[in-house]
Image (spheres, rainbow, N blue to C red):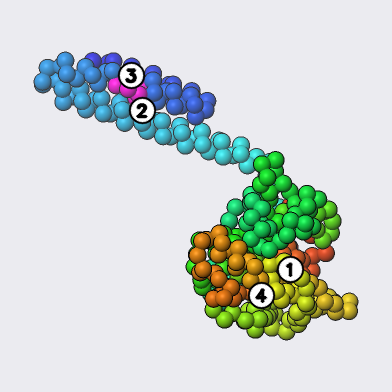
């Protein structure tokens, strides 16, 4: 019986020694120590032996298994050493190390996060809504008449179903008022879509952030104070702003906001960054009709709304001259913000 174990050991050590690679070594292990291996089969004979012979046979069995296991480990270490040497063959270890480039947030993500943090500190909550909208939420509820240019197919993306891609995130304001009673203080960042010709200052898909505050006795002073604080927090305490009278169907009075842009080597100039105004009573009337109650009756509440393009804010903050750079994924441009 011991001669059989010696033969198994000799065969196993020979197979291990001649194994040229890890796969062959693993096969040798299976052939001798696996569930159907030769040594495993030999150990099954233990139960057929007389009681007095079992201790000696068990001891011999353990010695053979130990010898095979040790040989497997030694050969495995040798093969790994050879593989390691081959892996680094031809590498010049005297060369300087390669720079590991760090990642970073996209400038649009950074400007959005900054804007949200500032407005959240003023008590605004985040709100969201669908990007595929209907005309009521995108236009009708916002006092936009049927003949308004924004509703033309030359300006808005329509589906055959009559649905459309929202032209602004104001539709989120409408949906929020339909489902929440005043006071309401929300901001709605997200994508908006318009049929604009793509050039250095326009994209057909852009990122917008709009805000709405509705409560009792909300005034124009509240609107101005909010936005002056916002832009001075975003661009710096010395940022100069001006409010110009304008027209929007959903606010009255309405204003466009300009900030004075200072670029080294150039004369300062005013640049438009946002639109805003006091919510038109007609909007509240449409919301009241949709809700079927008087929670937003223009006799009870007032409010202000504002909207701005995050792409434009990013261009101003970092001096980006072409808006298309924000969507081209050119790492030579983006690595400036890492």
Q: Quadrant of residue 16?
A: top left
- Mark 4 vs mark 3, foreground winner is 4
Secondary structure of the residue carrying numbered label 2: helix
- Distance from disc 1 to disc 3, alpha carbons, whole Å, reads 83 Å
Task: Please state the horizontal and vertical placement of residue 97, each as a whole percent of the image.
Answer: 67, 55
Q: Which residue is mark 3?
A: 36
Q: Is residue 47 magenta?
A: no
Q: Is residue 34 magenta?
A: yes
Counting other residues with Cα less than 10 Å from the Cα at mark 4, is it few (<14), some (14-19), or many (20 or more)?
many
- Distance from disc 2 to disc 3, alpha carbons, whole Å, reads 16 Å
- Mark 1 vs mark 3, foreground winner is 1
Query: Residue 68: which numbered mark, if any?
Result: 2
- Distance from disc 1 to disc 4, alpha carbons, whole Å, reads 10 Å
Q: Quadrant of residue 106?
A: bottom right
Q: Which residue is mark 1?
A: 248
- Mark 2 vs mark 4, foreground winner is 4
Camera-side residue of 247 and 271: 247
Q: Earlier in the sequence, mark 1 or mark 3?
A: 3
Task: Please state the horizontal and vertical placement of residue 276, each as a whole percent of the image.
Answer: 70, 72
Secondary structure of the residue carrying numbered label 1: strand
Q: Earlier in the sequence, mark 2 or mark 3?
A: 3
Task: Please state the horizontal and vertical placement of residue 250, each as a whole percent of the image.
Answer: 68, 67
In this image, 154 relative to 279: left or right? right
Q: Earlier in the sequence, mark 4 or mark 3?
A: 3
Q: Residue at x 21, y 27 (%)?
A: 59
Q: Residue furthest left?
A: 51
Q: Is residue 318 visible?
A: no
């Amino acid at each position: 019986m011991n001669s059989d174990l010696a033969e198994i050991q000799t065969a196993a050590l020979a197979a291990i020694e001649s194994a040229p690679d890890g796969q062959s070594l693993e096969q040798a292990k299976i052939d001798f120590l696996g569930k159907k291996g030769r040594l495993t089969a030999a150990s099954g004979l233990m139960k057929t032996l007389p009681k007095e012979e079992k201790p000696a046979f068990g001891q011999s069995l353990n010695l053979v298994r130990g010898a095979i296991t040790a040989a497997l480990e030694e050969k495995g270490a040798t093969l790994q050493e050879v593989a390691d040497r081959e892996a680094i063959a031809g590498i010049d270890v005297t060369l300087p190390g390669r720079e590991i480039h760090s990642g970073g947030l996209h400038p649009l993500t950074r400007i959005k996060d900054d804007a949200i943090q500032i407005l959240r500190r003023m008590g605004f909550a985040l709100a969201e809504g669908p990007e595929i909208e209907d005309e009521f939420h995108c236009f009708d509820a916002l006092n936009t008449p049927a003949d308004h240019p924004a509703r033309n197919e030359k300006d808005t993306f329509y589906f055959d179903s009559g649905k459309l891609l929202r032209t602004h995130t104001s539709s989120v304001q409408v949906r929020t008022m339909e489902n929440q009673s005043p006071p309401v203080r929300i901001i709605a960042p997200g994508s908006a879509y318009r049929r604009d010709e793509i050039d250095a200052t326009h994209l057909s898909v852009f990122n917008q952030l709009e805000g709405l505050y509705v409560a009792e006795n909300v005034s124009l002073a509240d609107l101005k104070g909010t936005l002056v604080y916002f832009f001075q927090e975003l661009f710096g305490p010395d940022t100069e702003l001006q409010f110009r009278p304008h027209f929007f169907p959903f606010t009255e009075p309405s204003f466009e906001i300009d900030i004075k842009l200072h670029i080294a080597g150039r004369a300062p100039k005013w640049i438009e960054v946002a639109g805003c105004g006091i919510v038109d009573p007609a909007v509240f009337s449409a919301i009241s009709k949709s809700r079927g109650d008087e929670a937003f009756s223009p006799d009870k509440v007032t409010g202000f709304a504002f909207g701005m393009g995050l792409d434009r804010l990013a261009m101003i903050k970092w001096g980006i001259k072409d808006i298309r750079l924000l969507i081209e994924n050119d790492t030579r441009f983006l690595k400036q913000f890492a």
